[in-house]
Image: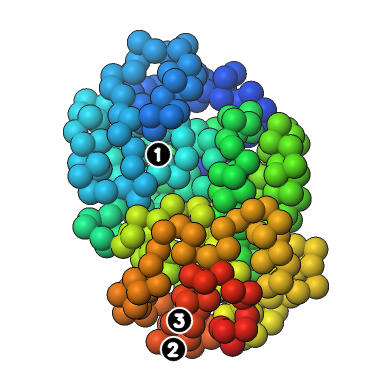
Amino acid sequence: MNAFTYDALPGRVVFGSGAASTQLLAEVDAFGARRILLIAGSSEADLARELCAPFADRIAAEFTDVRPHVPVEVAERARAAAAGADLVLSVGGGSTTGTAKAVALTTGLPVLAVPTTYAGSEVTPVWGLTEGNRKTTGTDPRVLPRTVVYDPDLTLTLPPELSVASGLNAMAHCVEAFWAPRRNPVSSAVAAEGIRHLAAGLPAIAADGADGAARSDLLLGAYLAGSAFAVAGSGLHHKICHVLGGAFDLPHARTHAIVLPHVLAFNAPDAPAAAARIAVALGQVDPVGGLHELGAKLGVPQGLQELGLAEGDLETVLDDILALAPADNPRPVTPAGVRRLLHAAWAGTAPGGANT
């Protein structure tokens, strides 16, 4: 086995059905928090207030103007709302967690996260901000939530379409962890287990959104996915999706779900060991075909064009993607290769043919 370094990230995880209702107060008390900034998107605000009812007198301010990709102006308003707070409590998906991270980045306030989707952002030290049409990401230990309360019950009302897209976004974290810059045997083992839980939960949740066991599988898979991604880092797939999302305000999870099989097809021939482990975790002989077929069965949009992206827009972001592409990507990243990958993902053609 090759020598490696594994940075175990700090953080407390509380996982279980009903955990948000029965254990959130104790977790807030553990911080000694007396003035809390509550961050929740408008669609989750009522849920957040309900969860905070036992300590409502400690909610000093609410921020509900959550936006995808965290525009800089939104981050500034959230930071202003945090004046005098001693804890940031986020209840919601990746955009909500991202907004809380933006506050923590400049204030140093601790974050307690209660996820309601499968984003995985709650266990990573990665932040992202968008200014104009450019998304900037970075890593800072200050933004890593100190405590995460995972409650599968909170995902029961997540519509099947969003559940699928969010779950495949988590799948992208796992797949990319096998060749991301800081990959190691521990992060790869975590990623493989994450894929296994996600592959089990996704078809079941598409068939029955009220399947509690499947919801637990997906949430556990998302936690493992975020944990693997946090340690291994961001690779070509995430660079592509972050550029596209920031430039064209595309829906984050659906963009990841569409692009993932194409990046896997691009890298798999040059990363056979990783591809083999991904195949085993998926329970498939061909990981590229298996992942593409899974997405098709789950109703994932077949191409980026279905998200409203114009084919001519692809060329405008090519240089930005090439500038961010990791130098150690399994396959050399060339303008021609990325161009073919992007056009295949845009058109929704079967991954592999145009990318090889």
Residue underneath mark 1: 96
Residue 45 sits in which quadrant? Answer: top left
Residue underneath mark 2: 336
User: What's the CA distance linking mark 2 and mark 3?
Assistant: 6 Å
Query: Residue 94's spot in the image, x, y percent?
Result: 45, 45
| Quadrant into which the C terminus falls | bottom right
Task: Name the disc covering residue 3, or none.
Answer: none
Q: Nearer the viewer, residue 84 or 63?
A: 63
Amino acid type, residue under disc 2 in the picture: Ala
Q: Nearer the viewer, mark 1 or mark 2?
A: 2
Q: Which element carries disc 3, helix, strand or loop?
A: helix
Examine the rendered structure and indicate whether residue 28 appears above or below residue 332.
above
User: What's the CA distance linking mark 1 and mark 2?
Assistant: 36 Å
Q: Is residue 237 visible?
A: no
Q: Residues within 10 Å of mark 1 (few under 14, many from 20)?
A: many
Residue underneath mark 3: 338
Q: Residues within 10 Å of mark 3 (few under 14, many from 20)?
A: many
Amino acid type, residue under disc 1 in the picture: Thr
Query: Residue 19's spot in the image, x, y percent?
Result: 61, 25
> Does residue 22 appear to the left or right of 328 in the view shown?
right
> Does residue 355 appear to the left or right of 30 in the view shown?
right
Q: Residues within 10 Å of mark 2 (few under 14, many from 20)?
A: few
Q: Which element carries disc 2, helix, strand or loop?
A: helix
Amino acid type, residue under disc 3 in the picture: Val
Query: Residue 355's spot in the image, x, y percent?
Result: 56, 83
| Quadrant into which the N terminus falls | bottom right
Q: Residue at x 35, y 51 (%)?
A: 69
Q: Nearer the viewer, mark 1 or mark 3?
A: 3
Q: Residue at x 47, y 11 (%)?
A: 54
CB under 8 Å between discs 2 and 3: yes
Examine the rendered structure and indicate whether residue 60 appears above or below residue 5.
above
Residue 290 sits in which quadrant? Answer: bottom right
